[in-house]
Amino acid sequence: MPGWIYIFLFLFGICIGSFLNVVILRYEPDKHILKNVGGRSRCPHCRRVLKWYELIPLLSFAFQKGRCRTCRARLTWQYPLVEFLSGLVFVAVPWVALRNNPGVITYLLHPFPTSSAISQSFYHSLRLVAVGNTALAGLWIVVFLALIVIATIDLRLKIIPDELNVFLAILGIGAILIKYFLRGFSFSGGHIQGSFLESYATLFGFTGNVWLNALVGAGSVVVFLGIIHFFSRGRAMGFGDVKFSFGIGLLMGWPDAAVAILLSFIVGSIISLFLLAIGKEKLKSKLPFAPFIVLGITLVYFFGYDIINGYFRLFGVQI
Ligand SMILES: [Zn+2]
């Protein structure tokens, strides 16, 4: 894909991120997440209505050096961070999708090429796979945007809005339907039926039935986090995290969802120990866990194969 498309995607992404900031900052628990989204943007400190040039993603924050132009109050770093990450999602997901399925644009845009050495029906199948994989990549862009909102709201309020968990579960069913559509083609890119761990998925008793696979994925993580929630009486793991993991399980299936949760515990422990060591956190204080789960999902989505490959190579196993 030419570079200017990625630049366009990034610019589009940071505008979406700007909207997500509004959604996050105006969210009030017990109210629907989209209830307060309408209305002009104001400075959270002096309540002045902001001009259009104060609402330009990334640039306004940079030029105003992170402060309100009138009251000089410090603006939260959440603004540029959420904008940048949203832009990154719009670049990274298509980039990975194209890396795994290099022919996708040709198959999508060009009807059967006259010079092609392959048969028309085979080309048609390639085209259907390209449509399916493009839909899956588009779906994952929406998933990652939802994950940004979930992680940021959990960091701010230590809560995961139920409507976002329902939204993720619906996206999960969408992902299952696309994988079900792709299942008949033996050449669906590098992913074996959508596992980001590729050939390693088979080591974990991967099942080729997409519905069963999603149910096992969701069941395993819900039971695992549910047990931690139950025995710690909600201290180590909130029930919001348990509900959150259900949608993740549907989206990623087995074993990807379980690996994502496992990685979130590893990353979570490392970061918690680091925060304890520098005295930022006390042993008793409860860290929001959703951001770690989001990190785990991100690691599996972008580096799942490399991480598992690296791990197994430690023991001399390679497939
Ligand atoms: Zn102000």
Image (tube, helix red, strand yellow):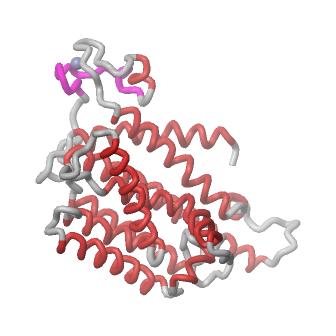
47 part of magenta stretch: yes
Is any atom of residue 29 visible in this view? yes
Q: Residue furthest top?
A: 70
Q: Does residue 216 appear to the left or right of 198 in the view shown?
A: left
Residue 237 horizontal/vertical position (percent): 23, 64
Is any atom of residue 128 visible in this view? no
Q: Does residue 142 appear to the left or right of 51 in the view shown?
A: right
Above or below, 308 relative to 282: below
Specify the segment rendered in magenta. Answer: 42-56
141 part of magenta stretch: no
Q: Residue at x 31, y 56 (%)?
A: 290
Residue 293 horizontal/vertical position (percent): 37, 60
Q: Quadrant of residue 252?
A: bottom left
Quadrant where the C terminus lies? bottom right
Above or below, 72 relative to 3: above
Q: Residue at x 37, y 82 (%)?
A: 215
Residue 184 horizontal/vertical position (percent): 60, 84
Above or below, 303 relative to 252: above
Q: How many marks?
A: 0
Q: Which of the four quarters of the rendered structure image does ligand 1 lie in?
A: top left
Q: Does residue 147 appear to the left or right of 314 in the view shown?
A: left
Q: Residue furthest left?
A: 30
